[in-house]
Image (cartoon, grey):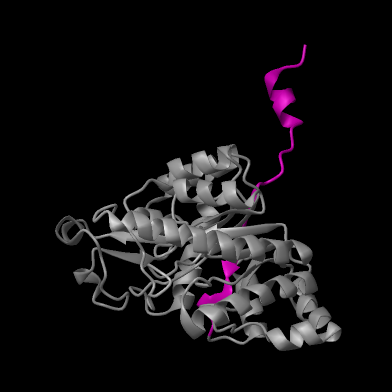
């Protein structure tokens, strides 16, 4: 009879997740210096910004699209450091009226071309948010069902969203993109489980979520429960490692925070922080265990917007140190 110790000794389980980096946080470094720095921190996968809100600090989009040699050199430099190019990030608002919305739409389409050129099958993006009507000029993110005309606005906005993204996912598929991961970011049509379900029902399995717990924290949700439900429905396509520190006193008084990120931290209801500076090891271990139990396999990309630390590099380093102790990697 096989004893328990012998039985378990023979089981080798693949590690479901690996530590990645959204390289915007090292935007002041050159591509080569970023690669060396990330590799030294134990980063295994990269998420590169290629348009939209990104200034593209670590990619020459035109050169990559135009030159096979440029593509080979780019990928070779990553591989030489023992890393992989996991995903491209084109977070944007393609639904915004005016010139910027038009530019963001073009950036998203171009990100599909880049993905094909670089052999990447996943794009990180945001659904965006339209104006309140065809005549409006400014984005209008609805957060209440009253006054009741807000319901008419939402109906219009979903129609605009479906129209753009239905065309976009067709273009994506033509370039070999298999997954578009929408970040659950505020001021977007998709920001929670319900809105993700709406978009999945309309567009199909090509779309899922880039689950960023930091946004869930300040909106009052439970990232672990979201991870559990989203994994059950096979909706988690990417994960961001970013934390959020809640200032309980200010949160109790101010409720919704609209001061800029760079406002004095003590005056805000919440602040984005390096991983581990808003929630402890136990919380993050449960989060990663929930993802693993839900069969998520893929990158966990460090993203930093920490105005409490002296610089982004420090925030990335602290996040990486923390993740080495907590994630299933």
Residue furthest left in the image: 253
Q: Is residue 259 left or right of 19 when viewed as pictured?
A: left
Residue drawn 56% across and 78% down? 104
Residue sitting at the far top:
1
Q: Nearer the viewer, residue 216 or 38?
A: 216
Q: Is residue 184 visible?
A: no
Q: Position of residue 37 (x, y in %)?
A: 60, 77
Stretch in magenta: 1-27
Q: Dividing the image into 4 quarters, which one contains the N terminus?
A: top right
Snapshot quadrant of residue 42: bottom right
Q: For residue 13: magenta?
A: yes
Q: Is residue 31 visible?
A: yes
Q: Residue at x 73, y 75 (%)?
A: 114
Residue at 31%, 51% (x, y): give it: 220
Farthest-out residue, front: 135
Question: Residue reaching furthest right?
Answer: 68
Where does the image place residue 69, in percent across and percent down from the top left?
85, 85
Where is residue 40, by image quadrant? Answer: bottom right
């Amino acid at each position: 009879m096989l004893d328990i110790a012998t039985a378990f000794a023979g089981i080798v389980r693949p590690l479901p997740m690996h530590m990645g980096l959204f390289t915007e946080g090292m935007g002041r470094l050159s591509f080569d210096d970023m690669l060396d720095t990330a590799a030294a921190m134990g980063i295994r996968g990269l998420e590169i910004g290629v348009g939209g809100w990104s200034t593209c600090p670590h990619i020459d989009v035109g050169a990559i699209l135009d030159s096979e040699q440029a593509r080979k050199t780019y990928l070779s430099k990553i591989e030489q450091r023992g890393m992989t190019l996991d995903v491209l990030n084109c977070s944007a608002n393609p639904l915004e009226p005016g010139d910027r919305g038009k530019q963001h739409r073009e950036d998203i389409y171009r990100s599909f071309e880049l993905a094909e050129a670089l052999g990447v099958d996943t794009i990180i993006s945001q659904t965006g948010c339209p104006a309140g009507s065809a005549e409006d000029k400014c984005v209008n993110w609805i957060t209440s069902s009253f006054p009741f005309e807000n319901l008419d606005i939402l109906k219009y906005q979903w129609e605009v969203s479906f129209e753009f993204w239905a065309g976009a996912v067709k273009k994506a598929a033509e370039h070999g993109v298999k997954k578009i991961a929408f970040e659950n970011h505020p001021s977007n049509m998709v920001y929670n489980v319900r809105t993700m379900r709406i978009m999945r029902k309309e567009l199909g399995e090509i779309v899922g979520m880039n689950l960023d717990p930091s946004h869930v924290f300040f909106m009052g949700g439970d990232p672990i429960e979201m991870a559990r439900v989203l994994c059950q429905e096979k909706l988690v396509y990417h994960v961001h490692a970013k934390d959020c520190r809640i200032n309980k006193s200010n949160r109790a008084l101010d409720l919704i925070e609209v001061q800029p990120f760079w406002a004095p931290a003590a005056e805000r209801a919440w602040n984005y922080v390096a991983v581990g500076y808003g929630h402890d090891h136990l919380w993050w271990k449960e989060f990663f265990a929930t993802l693993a139990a839900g069969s998520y396999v893929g990158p966990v990309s460090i993203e930093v917007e920490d105005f409490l630390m002296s610089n982004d590099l420090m925030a990335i380093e602290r996040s990486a140190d923390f993740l080495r102790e907590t994630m299933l990697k």
